[in-house]
């Protein structure tokens, strides 16, 4: 917290004009206190439990603690409240980290930003939200970053496909929505998508539509090529497709009276040329492709404030996970994109390398353990093989004795181990 406060002061001091506001910040660095800030919904009775954990591997045992989903195949619904604000006239930045350390098969990793009127105790999948943002994975087919905006009561998904991270490490997700109706999505502080709200979502009907009055003129010739009218079919073109085989001979034992009149079998005619088609030439009357003229769409009204929400007051995790273990941390909602970038550098950026190192160390140990187990198993198998060989040798001796006509004394004990056979003797 201190580092961030200092950072905030520094930012405010250096740029007095750009008033940085941090609307919400959650680092989970004060023990169990988060439980008073995050409210679990009671909409269902069996929501999965979030627990505070840095996971199996981390860069910093304390700083990397976050909310971890702890039960497989459960819905989760918890949220935290902050002072209500509107993003009118300023950027809105939503940032958080997600770590699917369980190598997730199917589950959400996104947040929802709600208007403050939402009832946290009853928050659920159909609760009206402003923005839904973050990774979503389900099987190999779905690995995307959702950016869904509620616009005039309807949820709109982004038209572009933004791929999310699907490894086991912590990643930083950032959404910036600007008052000029542009946006940017960043993963690990690198831009992965950006553009214009109007272009990349279907908030508004199209600006232009095809003129319903316009029709293609009847005499509009849009054939680029036509058959050459001067091209004529050669007189000797038409030949039958099949002809009697000239090499076929009537079998000598053919009896016209008994077998009927002999006919040679048919074969494909080598002179057959197929259907005749005139050469294609450029159509002298070609007018080009007819383009349907467009007019301004009477349904369209520009909206310079698509980005704007009058009330933002709650952030929630409302998701389903098949395999649990995802850790959410480093939540930040601010109006200052560069502050968010700095905070990202200062949190995720500082622990990511150590996290990777710890994981690699664990993987290496795991690999060594497996190798030793493999080695031990192979040695055990070798010993068993040798035992079996001895057993086989003895059995063979017995069989030989049987073949020699001797009393098969040990027949009943054949399946038993050589030791017990010896005991019997
Ligand atoms: C964040 O870190 C990156 C990589 O080290 C650096 O290029 C960038 O300037 C940093 N951003 C801020 C705002 O400090």
Image (tube, rainbow, N blue to C red):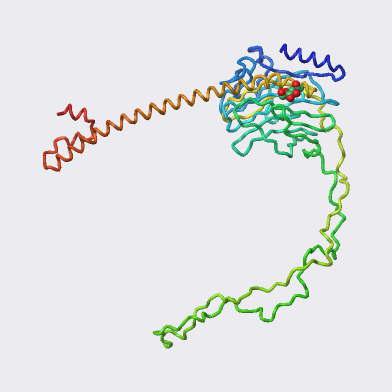
User: Is 317 left or right of 206, judged from the image as shown?
Assistant: left
Image quadrant, ligand 1: top right
For image coordinates 77% across by 72% down, the residue present is 228
For image coordinates 68% across by 17% down, the residue present is 27
Q: Position of residue 165 (x, y in %)?
A: 64, 31
Q: Position of residue 11 (x, y in %)?
A: 80, 16
Q: Position of residue 98 (x, y in %)?
A: 65, 25
- Residue 40 location, quadrant: top right
Total marks in image: 0
Residue 250 showing in the rendered view: yes
- Identify whether 181 is placed above or below 316: below
Q: Nearer the viewer, residue 224 or 137?
A: 224
Q: Residue furthest left?
A: 406
User: Is 313 left or right of 354, judged from the image as shown?
Assistant: right
- Identify whether 202 is placed above or below 326: below
For image coordinates 83% across by 16% down, the residue present is 14
Check the picture and name the quadrant holding the C terminus: top left
Q: Nearer the viewer, residue 352 or 296?
A: 352
- Identify whether 194 is placed above or below 277: above
- Residue 302 location, quadrant: top right
- Residue 45 location, quadrant: top right
Check the picture and name the quadrant holding the N terminus: top right
Q: Position of residue 104 (x, y in %)?
A: 58, 30
Residue 333 showing in the rendered view: no
């Amino acid at each position: 917290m201190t580092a961030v406060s200092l950072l905030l002061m520094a930012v405010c001091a250096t740029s007095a004009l750009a008033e940085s506001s941090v609307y919400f910040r959650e680092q989970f660095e004060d023990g169990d206190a988060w439980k008073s800030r995050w409210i679990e919904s009671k909409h269902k009775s069996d929501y999965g439990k979030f627990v505070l954990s840095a996971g199996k591997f981390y860069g910093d045992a304390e700083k990397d603690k976050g909310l971890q989903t702890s039960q497989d195949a459960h819905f989760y619904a918890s949220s935290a409240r902050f002072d209500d604000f509107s993003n009118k006239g300023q950027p809105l930045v939503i940032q958080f980290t997600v770590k699917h350390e369980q190598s997730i098969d199917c589950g959400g990793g996104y947040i929802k930003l709600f208007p403050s009127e939402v009832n946290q105790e009853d928050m659920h999948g159909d609760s009206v939200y402003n923005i839904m943002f973050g990774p979503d994975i389900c099987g190999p087919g779905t690995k995307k970053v959702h950016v869904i905006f509620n616009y005039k009561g309807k949820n709109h998904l982004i038209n572009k496909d933004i791929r999310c991270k699907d490894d086991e490490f912590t990643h930083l997700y950032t959404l910036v929505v600007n008052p000029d109706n542009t946006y940017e999505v960043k993963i690990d502080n690198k831009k992965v998508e950006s553009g214009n709200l109007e272009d990349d979502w279907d908030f508004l009907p199209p600006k232009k539509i095809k003129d319903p009055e316009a029709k293609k003129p009847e005499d509009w010739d849009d054939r680029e090529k036509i058959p050459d009218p001067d091209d004529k079919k050669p007189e000797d073109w038409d030949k039958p497709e099949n002809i009697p085989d000239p090499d076929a001979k009537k079998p000598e034992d053919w009896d016209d009276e008994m077998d009927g009149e002999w006919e040679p079998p048919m074969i494909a005619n080598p002179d057959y040329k197929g259907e005749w088609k005139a050469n294609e030439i450029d159509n002298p009357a070609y007018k080009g492709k007819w383009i349907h003229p467009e007019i301004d769409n009477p349904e369209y009204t520009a909206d310079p404030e698509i980005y704007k929400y009058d009330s933002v007051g709650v952030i929630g995790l409302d998701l389903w996970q098949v395999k649990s273990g995802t850790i959410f941390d480093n939540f930040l909602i601010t109006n200052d994109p560069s502050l968010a970038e700095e905070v990202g550098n200062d949190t995720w950026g500082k622990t990511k390398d150590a996290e990777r190192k710890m994981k690699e160390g664990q993987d290496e140990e795991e690999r060594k353990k497996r190798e030793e187990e493999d080695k031990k198993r192979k040695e055990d198998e070798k010993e068993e093989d040798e035992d079996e060989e001895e057993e086989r040798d003895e059995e063979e001796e017995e069989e030989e004795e049987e073949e020699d006509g001797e009393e098969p004394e040990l027949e009943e004990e054949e399946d038993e181990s050589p030791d017990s056979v010896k005991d019997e003797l």
